Image (spheres, rainbow, N blue to C red):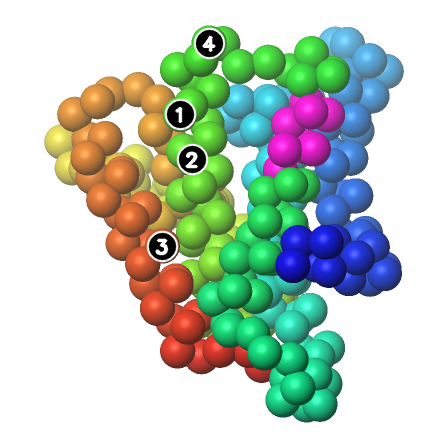
Amino acid sequence: MLAAELLKLKRNPMGMGLAIAGLALPVLVFAANQMNPNMQVKANGEAYLLPAHAVLALVTPYLLALETQQATAKWILTTPTSSLKVLFEKISVILLLVVLSLGVSFALGNLPENAAAFGAGMAGLVSSLGTLVLLTAITRNFALVLVVGFAWMQIIPRIVTALPEQAQPWLAAGLPGMGITHFAGDGEHQTVRIAMTAVIWILALLIWKKRGITL
């Protein structure tokens, strides 16, 4: 149940620390800008989405890769559950933290331009979450997911811009999330973005169901 997952997170110092770190990012950016207005610290993309992406990047691989390994063999054998049920409960906790992060951003004055921009931002979060779930299902390694995610966001955009101009929009639209897939902008490639997001989620769920819960 969601309440049980929240209680486990509350009793887990590392999990709580990662969640707080993600939620604190906009506060740190706001404080830095207030201390030195001449040197503005900005997010790569919409400012209000910064803490949400930070929460996804830090908490998702932890809850899915490390936290499940703390279960005991007795718990696995005596607790009737399924791997997908556990996954959805953990995703519910992650989404709750994302909602809190958006609240922090809004409280600091970081607001989306309009309803369409907000919807596009939420679609980008769903894409990023699916990519992180897929990566974690494949690797089951918290540190590796962080390294791959950071490298992906730093290297892939540079590779895309180095390709022929006519190929860039199609490739960029078809790349997995992690903050790269932007649903705002041209509608010509929106189908590619939606299809790729659906494929990523299907693969993630299939792999997670097959590999199940680990000790």
Which badge, 3 or 2, is on the more N-terminal residue?
Answer: 2
Proximity of marks 3 and 1: CB atoms separated by less than 8 Å: no
Mark 2: amino acid: Gly
Which badge, 3 or 1, is on the more N-terminal residue?
Answer: 1
Proximity of marks 2 and 1: CB atoms separated by less than 8 Å: yes
> Can residue 151 be spotted in the picture?
no
Mark 1: amino acid: Ala
Comparing 173 with 32, the one in front is: 173
Residue shown at 79%/57% (left/top)?
7
Q: Quadrant of residue 40?
A: top right
Q: Which mark is residue 152?
A: none
Which badge, 4 or 2, is on the more N-terminal residue?
Answer: 4
Q: Which residue is mark 2?
A: 124
Q: Which residue is mark 3?
A: 201
> Which quadrant of the rendered structure holds the C terminus?
bottom right
Residue shown at 82%/62% (left/top)?
12
Residue shown at 39%/63% (left/top)?
205
The location of residue 28, given as percent across then percent down, is 79, 29
Q: Quadrant of residue 2?
A: bottom right
The location of residue 136, given as percent across then percent down, is 50, 65
